[in-house]
Amino acid sequence: MQKIFFVLSLSILTAAGVTRVFTGPYMVYDAGVPIDVGYYGAPVMSDWDGDGKKDLICGQFDLGKIRFYRNIAEDTAPLFNGYVFLRADGVEITLPYG
Ligand SMILES: [Ca+2]
């Protein structure tokens, strides 16, 4: 199984210019439970619903579906409470898997 982790990237302005610093990894939780999508999750953070907060979109191995976790907190400390499968024309999107 594959748990989802975040690696945070921070931009720090120094006298020599902008330096990027990476911290983590941090386990990602959904309602207090580690998110586990099987394999090949390919997680992406993007503001999918246009509310200004980056959401989590990731695939799941089982059935090749794509999960959408809406961020209900801030980008600096995202918080998720459940997911829905992404749909196109009312039908859940599935991709080849396995
Ligand atoms: Ca959003």
Image (cartoon, helix red, strand yellow):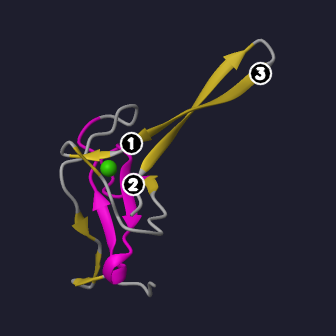
Determine crowd level at label 1: few under 14, some 14-19, many 20+ residues with C-alpha closer than 10 A.
few
Determine crowd level at label 2: few under 14, some 14-19, many 20+ residues with C-alpha closer than 10 A.
some
Magenta stretch bounds: 46-73
How far apart are the two marked residues, 1 and 3, measured between alpha carbons?
31 Å
Earlier-in-chain disc, 3 versus 2: 2
Tell me how many marks there are. Answer: 3
Which amino acid lies under the numbered mark 3 shown in the image of this protein?
Gly
Q: Is residue 82 magenta?
A: no
Disc assigned to residue 27: 1
The quarter of the image holding the C terminus is: bottom left
- Give the residue at x 44% y 65%: 41
Which amino acid lies under the numbered mark 1 shown in the image of this protein?
Met
SS class, disc 3: strand
- Give the residue at x 35% y 45%: 28
Q: Is residue 78 above or below residue 17?
A: below
Q: Which residue is mark 2?
A: 3
Determine crowd level at label 3: few under 14, some 14-19, many 20+ residues with C-alpha closer than 10 A.
few
Q: Which residue is mark 3?
A: 17
How far apart are the two marked residues, 2 and 1, measured between alpha carbons?
7 Å
